[in-house]
Image (tube, helix red, strand yellow):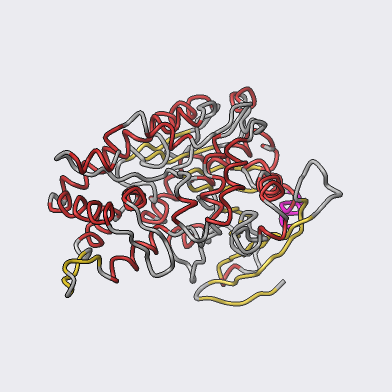
Amino acid sequence: MTSYRQPGTVCTDHRFTVPLDHASPSGERIELYAREVVAADRAGDDLPWLLYLEGGPGFGARRFVGRQAWLGRALKEFRVLLLDQRGTGLSTPVNRQTLPLRGGPREQAAYLAHFRADSIVRDCETVRPALTGGAPWTVLGQSFGGFCATHYLSTAPEGLSTVLITGGLPSLDARVDDVYRAAYPRMERKVAAHYARYPQDVARARDVAAHLAVNRTVTPNGYTLTPEAFQSLGIVLGGADGTHQLHHLLENAFVRTPRGPELSDAFLEAVQSALSFAGHPLYALLHESIYGQGHEPTAWGAERVRAEFPRFDAGAALAGSGPLLFTGETVHPWHFDCDPALRPLRESAELLAARTDWPSLYDPARLAANEVPVAAAVYHDDMYVDTEHSLRTARAVRGLRTWVTDEFEHDGLRAGGPRVLDRLLALARGEV
């Protein structure tokens, strides 16, 4: 272990080895990385632990500097563990560079099947006794981290003293098609709100899509920007300042050149930064599998269900006079053609999409008998996680208390920081 100081904190790097497949504990092992953070003035105190599970799938834990955001509030009473979930950050990272070590697409897909919430929770239960001496800990799950926390409640509640969830209460039984049938109308509402705020962006978005429809466009990192890929910039609209980000990007789209108007280098640089999966390829590879339960393949659900919402068709929008609709929180087969970070993984992704043996992730009977204090922030009209699905789950988990708010978007834990965590702790403790 290595310890070091940041402003107001003492950090310690931890590395653990866990089974790749927890059903075969004597088989192959992988390495996990986690950063322990404690307030500098309490470094020697015997404090309860709080485990933070990041959103995703595919994102490592946030790299805080000092006592930023919600972490400052947590450090008043907890020793915090920021876990890079398996395959992310420094925990045996999964990407186009490392996956060929597994072999071909079939071997890669078999390996990737061990990177869902069920394996992540087993990892947590493997490392918990070494850190806490066997004591249960508080888990804070953001977005997909909340999906993991709900699975934790279903399978190992004895490891939990409290569960706090922000923007991540999953449906217990929705299939992938149900998820996206609920998602496309939410996306359309977010786009309508954006155009209401910035009506000048209606023409700008149409102009960019029209240009891409007739001009092959490749960003500096090799990303092929098609009209459909451009539409997926709508993923930013689920964040607190996403509408402003999108507006600032669009206002900088074109420049005058000797050959006429062209998409600016600054625009293409910003687009590739927003769209590239290079830093989080597991998001694209496993995104639909987080909804996989039972014997049905996910089979590119977002792409299939999109056909039920023809207003999202870029060609039809350009042929008519209506606004171009952006998408978000959806992964499509063409992502694996457009993005150079994903192209070598296309066959593996196809095999995952065809898989029919995903284990169930949630135990409704056990959740109905839950005894762990649970509090969840549910964001009104959250673009990434359906509010009605979340509230239905909240009613199914015994003792779960919700805070339903439109004060924040999906990234409320980041934007609201200490206030959000304060509220959830108070709810879980029955103080409000």
In the depicted structure, whether residue 69 falls above or below residue 150: below
Q: Is residue 11 left or right of residue 383?
A: right
At 26% from the left edge and 35% from the top edge, which residue is drawn? 311
On the image, the x and y values in percent for residue 401 come to: 47, 33
Percent across and percent down for residue 213 are 28, 51
Task: Determine the residue positioned at 18% across, 46% down.
Answer: 195
Q: Quadrant of residue 18?
A: bottom right
* Residue 261 vertical placement versus 191 (above, below): below
Is residue 212 left or right of 299 when viewed as pictured?
left
Left or right relative to 40: residue 194? left
Which residue is the extreme one toward the right?
26
Place residue 351 in its image quadrant: top right
Res. 236 in view: no
389 shown above or below 280? above
Is residue 128 covered in magenta? yes
Q: Which residue is painted at 18% across and 73% down in the image?
A: 257
330 vs 76, nearest the viewer: 330
Quarter that holds the N terminus: bottom right
- The x, y position of residue 136, in whole percent, is 68, 46
Q: Can the viewer see residue 117 in this picture? A: yes
**Magenta segment boundaries in residue numbering:** 127-134
Q: Nearer the viewer, residue 356 or 386?
A: 356
Eyeballing the image, is 76 above or below 430?
below
Residue 424 within the segment the image draws in magenta: no
Quadrant where the image shows the C terminus: top left
The main secondary structure of the magenta stretch is: helix
Camera-side residue: 43 or 164?
164
